[in-house]
Amino acid sequence: MLKYLALSLLLSLFFIGCSNEPVYNVYLAGDSTMADKKPEAYPETGWGQVFPEFFDTARVNFENHARNGRSSKSFRSEGLWDEMMANVVPGSYVFIQFGHNDERPSKGSDRYSTIPEFKENLRQYVREVRQHESFPILLTPIVRRKFDVDGHMINTHLDYPDATRSVAEEMNVLLIDLTNRSKEFVEAKGDSL
């Protein structure tokens, strides 16, 4: 509950601001569910693509480095993490969301991460953000819209959301539980469009 309160306070700062109009810097690291999409892909949209629409972009700078198909392993091995961190200035907010591609051995050894590897990847991201005197925020992966024959959602993320929650608690990092939030939304919509 305290983490949600702290997150609400953080987001309130974005909206209300202070009298001297500070500028906030927000960086996004993640997979396709967060990534910017090309116009021809519409209506497919990553949430990070529309996130800036909720803020005064004269006061909040956004850099969305999320890419389709990336995992906590490949985001680093492909240099995307280093590229992003080269721009991070002290006091920035870094949103980190992985799990969609880490969980699938079929994605190959360059993307698949075991739970222990996944947790260590998240820990390393958190440590590096803090070394930049910035604020890491971990997010659990958005659910896949997959139902069984009885209309119940299938957990395709296995233990990866719990692994993210565990690292957030262990390292005292703010957590946004997109798994549970998106599950509630998708279940309310149901299996048919």
Image: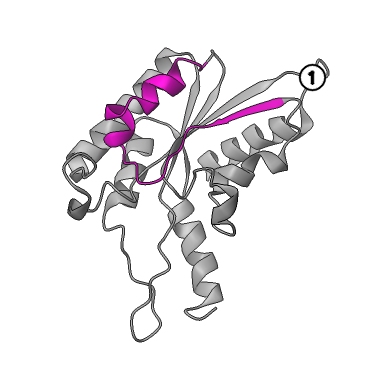
**Residue 84 in which image quadrant:** top left
Q: Residue at x 43, y 32 (%)?
A: 173
Mark 1, other Cα within 10 Å: few <14 / some 14–19 / many ≥20: few
At label 1, which amino acid type do we have?
Answer: Glu
SS of the residue at dot 1? loop
Q: Please provide percent x and percent y for residue 71.
A: 31, 41
Residue 69 included in the magenta stretch of the image: yes
Residue 153 lies, with reference to residue 68, above or below; the image says: below
In the drawing, does residue 16 fall left or right of residue 110?
A: right
Magenta stretch: give its range: 60-88
- Residue extending farthest to the front is 40
Q: Position of residue 146 (x, y in %)?
A: 38, 71
Count all numbered tags in the image, as a single digit: 1
Residue under the image location 53 percent in, 47 percent down: 37
* The residue positioned farthest toward the bottom in the image shown: 150
Where in the figure is residue 72, as x and y percent of width and height?
Answer: 31, 37
Mark 1 = which residue? Answer: 21
Residue under the point 48% across and 32% down: 65
Quadrant of the snapshot with the C terminus = bottom right
